[in-house]
Image (tube, rainbow, N blue to C red):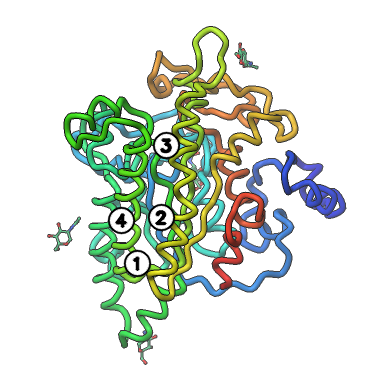
């Protein structure tokens, strides 16, 4: 760790490699506590940011503990070894990884506290918190039915439910402003970060939707999901959101539960389908931006961020992409309380589906400044726009 910290020449050198092929910036350690420290570590330079709030929607990759407040929810990740590297160790907050997630890093780099889980806030918190809220929920999806199709029992927050919670947030927040103008200005500057869709492509959707909606081939299904997603983004806009950052869907066919048992190869069929859906997103966002005045939609290419790692793990510091760091039963989360692997930073996956803190950090820093995985601008440029 120590060799990178406080070695500006090495950082400068690494910066040249931050586009395209890999680089090796490790997860920032405990001595990097302020926004200034992290910006320096990320070689972001002296950036000027006027960002009042960060609102987060999505599934497990961005969940910071909402599921733990849902009754009868068997999909909580509030036990060790989850959180083993969070804030000094054994803090199982509900984050579905070993340490911080992408949102924690982005919030710190942008100078905000990591937004708290919506369901864990008191009435007073809800009124007073003007810096953003996180609605992410493991197994959340665009289609309300997707968790059940995947065989998930118990509550999760779907995107529709996350939007309903945000609608209530807007009432609480609005009550803190003196004028509609100052409230609208606040909303227009706030950043909305969305990571949704993986669970819509993880299930036996073909069989289910054939009966329910007559959606009987993949192209129709992909269009159906993207149409619903587009409607949800429009609801977000109508609730005041203007700067909206959307991640595409990760290569679901390379999640460990999808690998071919013998060769450990990715499931190309699933990845091709995810890619076909992802190809719809650029036009979808352009269309929304052209029809919704004042909106700015940016697409983050999470698919490529993973693909780059799979193509050349060692250039990003990973040695293990086909086994999980924690011990699991087949198709299950980490075994409760069991010691995970020692060199967690070397693993892409913490459990059979969810990436390690190292991937979360890589994801955050590429979105922040790397225009090869963001379009039309990167995350910092969106905040500054
Ligand atoms: C949990 O994290 C906090 C900082 O967020 C840290 O102070 C504390 O020591 C951690 N708890 C444990 C049990 O390690
Ligand atoms: C929003 O607030 C109303 C009124 O307090 C409440 O009845 C409703 O359940 C809330 N919606 C959500 C999704 O929490
Ligand atoms: C509302 O007005 C008061 C008094 O002018 C001011 O102190 C406060 O900061 C304002 N609140 C907001 C959210 O602008
Ligand atoms: C890395 O993954 C392989 C399976 O591909 C596994 O056999 C091996 O033990 C793992 N290496 C380490 C260091 O855990």
Relative to residue 78, is residue 285 depicted above or below? Answer: below
Label 4 – label 1 distance at C-alpha: 9 Å
Tag 1 and tag 3, C-beta contact below 8 Å: no
Query: The N terminus lies in which quarter of the figure?
Result: top right
Q: Residue at x 30, y 68 (%)?
A: 239
Q: Which residue has dot 4 on it? A: 232
Q: CA distance from mark 1 to mark 3?
A: 34 Å
Give the mark nearer the N terminus: 4 vs 1: 4
- Looking at the image, the residue that sits furthest to the top is 262
Q: Is residue 327 left or right of residue 214?
A: right
Distance from disc 2 to disc 4, alpha carbons, whole Å, reads 14 Å
Mark positioned earlier in the residue sequence (1 or 3): 3
Q: Is residue 331 above or below residue 311?
A: above
Mark 3 to mark 2: distance in Å? 20 Å
Q: Residue 262: percent from the left, percent from the top?
A: 53, 7
Q: Which residue is mark 3?
A: 92
Task: Indicate which label's residue lies in the foreground, 3 or 2.
Answer: 2
Residue 56's disc number: 2
| N-terminal label among 1 and 2 | 2
* Residue 311: mark in rendering: none
């Amino acid at each position: 760790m120590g060799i990178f910290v406080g070695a500006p020449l090495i950082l400068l050198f690494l910066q040249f490699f931050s586009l395209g092929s890999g680089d090796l910036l490790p997860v920032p350690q405990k001595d990097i506590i302020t926004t200034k420290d992290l910006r320096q570590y990320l070689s972001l330079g002296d950036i000027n940011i006027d960002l009042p709030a960060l609102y987060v929607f999505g599934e497990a990759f961005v969940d910071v503990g909402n599921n733990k407040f849902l009754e009868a929810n068997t999909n909580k990740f509030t036990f060790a070894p989850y959180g083993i590297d969070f804030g000094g160790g054994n803090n199982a907050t509900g984050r579905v990884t070993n340490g911080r997630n992408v949102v924690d890093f982005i919030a710190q780099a942008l100078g905000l506290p990591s937004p708290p889980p919506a369901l864990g806030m008191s009435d007073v918190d809800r009124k007073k918190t003007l810096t953003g809220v996180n609605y992410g929920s493991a197994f959340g999806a665009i289609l309300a039915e997707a968790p059940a199709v995947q065989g998930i029992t118990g509550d999760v927050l779907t995107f529709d439910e996350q939007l309903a919670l945000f609608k209530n947030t807007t009432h609480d927040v609005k009550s803190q402003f003196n004028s509609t103008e100052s409230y609208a200005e606040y909303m227009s500057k706030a950043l909305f970060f969305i990571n949704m869709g993986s669970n819509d492509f993880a299930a036996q959707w073909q069989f289910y939707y054939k009966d329910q909606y007559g959606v009987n081939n993949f192209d129709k299904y992909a269009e159906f999901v993207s149409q619903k997603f587009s409607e949800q983004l429009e609801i977000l806009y109508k609730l005041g959101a203007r700067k909206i950052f959307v991640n595409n869907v990760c290569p679901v066919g390379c999640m460990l539960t999808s690998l071919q048992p013998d060769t450990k190869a990715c499931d190309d069929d699933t990845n091709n389908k995810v890619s076909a859906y992802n190809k719809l997103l650029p036009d979808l966002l352009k269309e929304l931006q052209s029809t919704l005045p004042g909106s700015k939609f940016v697409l983050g290419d999470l698919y490529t961020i993973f693909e780059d790692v799979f193509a050349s793990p060692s250039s990003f510091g990973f040695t293990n992409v086909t086994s999980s760091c924690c011990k699991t039963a087949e198709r299950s989360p980490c075994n409760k309380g069991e010691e995970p692997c020692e060199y967690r930073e070397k693993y892409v996956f913490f459990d059979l589906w969810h990436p390690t803190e190292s991937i979360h950090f890589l994801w955050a820093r590429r979105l922040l400044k790397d225009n090869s995985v963001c379009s039309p601008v990167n995350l910092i440029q969106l905040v500054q726009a």
